[in-house]
Image (cartoon, grey):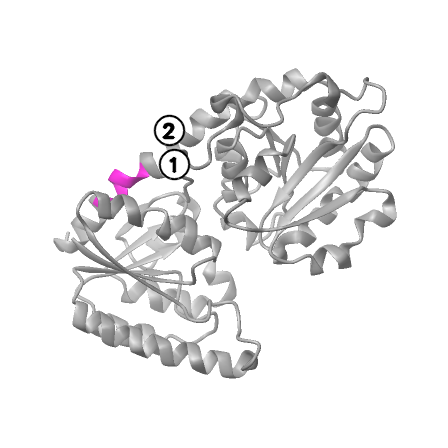
Amino acid sequence: MRVAFLTSGRFVPSSRFRVLQFVPHLQRLGHECLVLPSCPEKYASLPMLGFRLSGVFKRWNRQADLKSLERWSPDVVVLERELFSDATFDVEQTLRQISRRLVLDIDDGLFVLNRHKFEVLCGLSDHVIAGNELLATRVRTINSRVTVIPTCVDVEKWQGRGARGEGRGFSQADSPLTPNPSPLVLGWTGTAANIPYLEILREPLKQLSGEVPVELRIIAESDRPLRSLNLERDGIQTRFVRWSEATEVVELQAFNIGLMPMPDTDWTRYKCGLKILQYMAAGVPAVASPVGINSEIIHHGVNGWLATTPDEWLFVLRKLLSDPSRRDSVVTAARTTVADHYSVQSQLPRLIACLEAVRAGE
């Protein structure tokens, strides 16, 4: 097949995990791929132009991309989410006119932001790939041709510590009973815009910080929301690590426990659980809020833990910090969950079958 992908940007998580990591595998199997990212990235602007003029520049570049698509003439065009993070859809309508087959890929509740645009994009598409069943259910009210392909991680890249015998592991030095132990690392990774969700953990972390040496380690592209959150005023030792694609796996493997606190809102319950999948694939025990697909991915006490209230978070984290064997017990099951259901390797055949069916008009 000849497949073109219009993506949000080289470093945007939805582009990286729902498109870009599949492309080398598709090419290896003989499929031709053309990737056309937003320039500048969909949610960014060029400092020299500012936000408004950067938006004009993005549109100019997308018009050029449409001309490239006409020349390249792909069998299938995959649109990741939307072309612009606003209410407009005129360029997508032009894209529909020049595409033999158009597939929309969504991994968030875009209808929460703009219901009309979401309905238009679903209606324009020959097929929709949804990141989870909740999203698929919403799509089916508009377009019955839906395939669920979860957000995935490449298990060959996100190699767990237990599988390689590498990483910090859980040594005697990590035990709170050891004199002057090194801090246990409670880690969080994600986009800076979601850092405020850590407010959910303020009281549990404040309590834990008075009991055992712990460090809250944040991996993100910016620390501005973290500075506004100011958890350190409550005695919570915090360390910020600027995200880098080159170091993200190693940095994440340094976590003793991975955190995914999240409020239950119309927006969050449609998310695809990428954060906990990264933890699980990397051999890091995960604790998450039971919101949306999180409750499907994690089986409490088997491959991770779920916690809702501050008291539940405190109870689970206190147990895990005091007993390293509890943390170790879930690592193998967690990695198996990812490898079997949420990996590039397990979902690649499903993606290819979907695209081939769309090309055939099925």
Q: How many marks?
A: 2
* Residue 306 location (% of width, % of height): 61, 32
* Residue 271 location (% of width, % of height): 50, 49
* Disc on res. 57: none
Q: Which residues are magenta?
A: 347-352
Q: CA distance from mark 1 to mark 2?
A: 7 Å
Left of 15 or right of it: where is 2?
Answer: left
Determine the residue positioned at 76% across, 59% down: 228
Sort mark 1 into few (<14), some (14-19) or many (20+) by Cα contacts within 10 Å: many
Circle 2 — which element? helix
Left of 259 or right of it: where is 97?
Answer: left
Amino acid type of the residue tagged 2 in the rendering: Asp
In the image, residue 278 above or below residue 163: below
Determine the residue positioned at 43% across, 31% down: 338
Circle 1 — which element? loop
Q: Are marks 1 and 2 in contact (CB under 8 Å)?
A: yes
Q: Which residue is mark 2?
A: 340
Amino acid type of the residue tagged 1 in the rendering: Ser
* Residue 353 location (% of width, % of height): 20, 43
Determine the residue positioned at 40% across, 65% down: 118
Q: Which residue is mark 1?
A: 343
* Observer-nearest of 263 and 38: 38
Left of 150 or right of it: where is 124?
Answer: left
* Observer-nearest of 335 and 299: 335
Left of 45 or right of it: where is 170?
Answer: right
Magenta stretch contains residue 5: no
Q: Quadrant of residue 50?
A: bottom right
* Observer-nearest of 97 and 35: 35
Sort mark 2 into few (<14), some (14-19) or many (20+) by Cα contacts within 10 Å: few
In the image, residue 4 above or below residue 327: below
* Residue 153 location (% of width, % of height): 42, 40
